Image: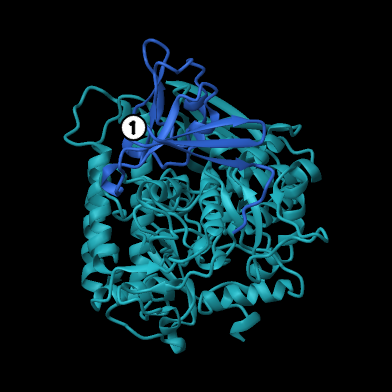
Chain colours: A cyan, B blue
């Protein structure tokens, strides 16, 4: 096997929003030799490959960072870290200004002020937000970018990070990377559950289908403390295309209506999970399908909507052209399959105020970092900046360490085993992925279960996912792309087991749909106004309940 | 949801292959691009914007209500001109200026 050994001061895993901004920050504040490893190409990778329609986390005039942090605490029904949210919120506007300097187009009024969309959002043209960030990163001194290098595991000695392992899908090489500090900026997890469109269009989903939860899986395996995997994210989307609905709801004020034409927004509450829940209940009680009421908007509004969607979800515009636009026909909506993502909900690594994880030298930012929901683009940038500042400080007192040869050999042996062509496997990674998604859908609260689960089903899910994990040992790859698919499956299975354990540990229903525990249908503030955290100890997931730190709206 | 690459237009530059977030595009023996894993396409349209030969178009799979239209993009400077060709050959165009913000 072709083995490439590289050293860097700071390794950034994932060149998405948070990772790119961490690199930009490091270049400003330190002379550290920085390496970004990205499984795709940083010009179009991560959540923003297609673009983004608005910046949803911004402190608009007349508001304060505390206002934003309070909003995020409330939307999470109290299960979030006010300290993290506030430190992020304080930077939302400065990172936005930096993005504008790099070339992002932000809508301004005649006085040169940003035009807002609601109390926390500003309007942009985000079609090329990722190329803008990538161009900035590619121009940085002391910064290398390795595209198509997929990091598969962390190298940890004692409780200290010393590097990582990866596979180069194009150069067919095994990578051993030694680094003094690592910033985990990999994405969240899509593809754990059977998706809305399980056939030909199985990847027509809300979140990037290439985000497998690798960052979480690496942390789980390394024994890092992880948080709030039970707070799944379910988006309310346009049917079939799984395009955003916020642009319709906030842009042209479209209400959610059932098949009788009754608006039901106010009946269930306005948090993200309430909106999905309301749609599920209207459907199950026989008043579906549900829609966003767009009939009767003006021709100008329709034209602007078609353009807005071309800049972030082009398939929706294509659908309107094929089937008739939103002016003639209300837009049908549905909930997606559940995802795990620290950028929208509070799942991820348990971190301190500097975004340091429980492993020394390992920092997390963006979707990887837990405790701070409603980050969106600007929150991910802010966390990339915070993590970079802390990592730059940390490496000042750290000497480079060598990864043990025995550890390297074990990792190479694992890859070599999957690449061994002498034994013929009975099935493919794709088949096991479909089986995993079916199990999660039916037994761990997916779409077909109306997001509901109970202990007996979770126990069954746990047993079945463990069996699939065992079977995955038998998979074989004919090239490095297939090798990546095997690692991706195993990353998802690792995250799935933690999700199942977390869902089972929260004996209450605090968030409809996100965590709808049939055994405990009510909210239990006495026992569960707490974080559900976990650690993998000797192969077993140990649950740790932690108090909510003081501060903010939950006080 | 997937993309279609017109081999007669493909100039073999490999731009689509290097930009695809899923690594789903490959080059055939004649140096022309093709999508090896059409079911794994996210529909992000990155390849369409990258292609200098305007050889790539987006379509909706029949499983999500697609009716056979193809959508491609012609980019010059800050203007992206999206061209949708319906099965009957009728076309519709929508121009986007990258320097203008979304209204919504």
Q: Is residue A403 visible?
A: no
Which residue is denoted by mark 1 in the rendering? B37
Q: Secondary structure at mark 1?
A: loop
Q: Within the image, what quadrant is residue A132 found in?
A: top right
Taking the image as shown, residue A321 lies to the left or right of residue A118, namely left
Find residue A8 and report its horizontal and vertical position in percent.
66, 34
Image point (26%, 42%), residue name:
A472
Taking the image as shown, residue B84 lies to the left or right of residue A482, namely right
Q: Quadrant of the C terminus of chain A?
A: bottom right
Nearest to the observer: residue A283 or residue A507: A283
Nearest to the observer: residue A3 or residue A243: A243
**Relative to A9, is A497 above or below?**
below
Q: Quadrant of the N terminus of chain A?
A: top left
Nearest to the observer: residue B75 or residue A433: B75
Find residue A100 and report its horizontal and vertical position in percent.
74, 49
Taking the image as shown, residue A180 lies to the left or right of residue A426, namely right
Image point (53%, 70%), residue name:
A253
**Relative to A101, is A42 above or below?**
above
């Amino acid at each position: 096997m072709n083995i490439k050994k590289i050293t860097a001061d700071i390794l950034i895993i994932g060149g998405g929003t948070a990772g790119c901004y961490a690199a930009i920050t490091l270049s400003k504040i330190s002379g550290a030799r920085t390496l970004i490893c990205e499984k795709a190409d940083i010009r179009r990778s991560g959540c923003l490959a297609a673009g983004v329609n608005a910046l949803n986390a911004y402190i608009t005039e007349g508001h304060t960072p505390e206002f934003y942090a309070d909003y995020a605490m409330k939307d999470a029904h109290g299960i979030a870290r006010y300290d993290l949210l506030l430190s992020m919120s304080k930077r939302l506007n400065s990172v936005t200004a930096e993005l504008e300097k790099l070339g992002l187009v932000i809508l301004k009024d005649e006085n040169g002020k940003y035009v807002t969309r609601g109390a926390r959002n500003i309007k942009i043209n985000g079609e090329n937000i990722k190329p803008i960030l990538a161009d900035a990163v590619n121009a940085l001194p002391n910064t290398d970018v390795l595209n198509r290098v997929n990091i598969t595991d962390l190298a940890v000695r004692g409780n200290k990070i010393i590097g990582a392992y990866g596979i180069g899908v194009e150069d067919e090489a095994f990578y051993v990377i030694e680094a003094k500090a690592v910033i985990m900026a990999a994405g969240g997890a899509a593809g754990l559950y059977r998706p809305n469109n399980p056939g030909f269009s199985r990847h027509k989903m809300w979140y990037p289908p290439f985000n497998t939860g690798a960052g979480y899986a690496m942390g789980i395996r390394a024994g890092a403390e992880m948080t709030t995997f039970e707070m799944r994210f379910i988006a309310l989307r346009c049917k079939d295309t799984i395009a955003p609905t916020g642009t319709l709801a906030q842009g042209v004020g479209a209400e959610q209506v059932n098949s009788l034409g009754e608006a039901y927004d106010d009946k269930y509450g306005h948090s993200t999970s309430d909106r999905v829940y309301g749609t599920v209940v209207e459907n199950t009680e026989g008043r579906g399908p549900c829609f966003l009421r767009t009939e009767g908007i003006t021709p100008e509004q329709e034209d602007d909507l078609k353009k807005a969607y071309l800049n972030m979800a082009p398939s929706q515009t294509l659908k309107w052209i094929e089937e008739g636009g939103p002016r003639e026909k209300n837009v049908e909506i549905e909930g997606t399959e559940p995802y795990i993502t620290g950028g929208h909900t509070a799942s991820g690594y348990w971190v301190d105020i500097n975004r340091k994880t429980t492993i020394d030298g390992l920092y997390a930012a963006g979707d990887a970092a837990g405790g701070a929901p409603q980050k969106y683009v600007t929150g991910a940038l802010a966390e990339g900046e915070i993590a970079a500042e802390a990592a730059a400080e940390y490496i000042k007192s750290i000497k480079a360490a060598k990864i043990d040869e025995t550890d390297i050999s074990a990792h190479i042996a694992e890859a070599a085993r999957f690449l061994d062509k002498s034994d013929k496997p009975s099935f493919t990674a794709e088949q096991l992925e479909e089986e995993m998604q079916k199990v999660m859908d039916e037994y761990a609260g997916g779409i077909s279960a109306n997001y509901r689960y109970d202990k007996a089903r979770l126990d069954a899910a746990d047993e079945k996912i463990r069996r699939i994990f065992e079977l995955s040992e038998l998979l074989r790859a004919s090239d490095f792309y297939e090798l990546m698919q095997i690692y991706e499956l195993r990353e998802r299975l690792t995250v799935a087991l933690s999700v199942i354990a977390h869902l089972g540990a929260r004996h209450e229903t605090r968030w409809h749909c996100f965590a709808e525990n049939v055994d405990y249908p009510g909210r239990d503030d006495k026992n569960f106004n707490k974080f559900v955290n976990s650690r993998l100890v000797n192969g077993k997931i140990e649950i740790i309940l932690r108090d909510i730190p003081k501060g903010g709206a939950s006080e | 949801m997937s993309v279609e690459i017109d081999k007669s237009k493909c100039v073999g530059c490999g731009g689509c292959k290097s930009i695809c977030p899923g690594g789903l595009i490959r080059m055939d023996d004649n140096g022309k691009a093709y999508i090896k894993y059409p079911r794994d396409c996210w529909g992000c349209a990155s390849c369409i914007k990258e292609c200098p030969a305007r050889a790539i178009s987006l379509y909706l799979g029949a499983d999500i209500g697609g009716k056979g239209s193809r959508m491609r993009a012609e980019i010059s400077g800050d203007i992206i001109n999206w061209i949708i060709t319906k099965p009957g050959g009728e076309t519709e165009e929508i121009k986007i200026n990258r320097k203008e913000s979304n209204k919504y």
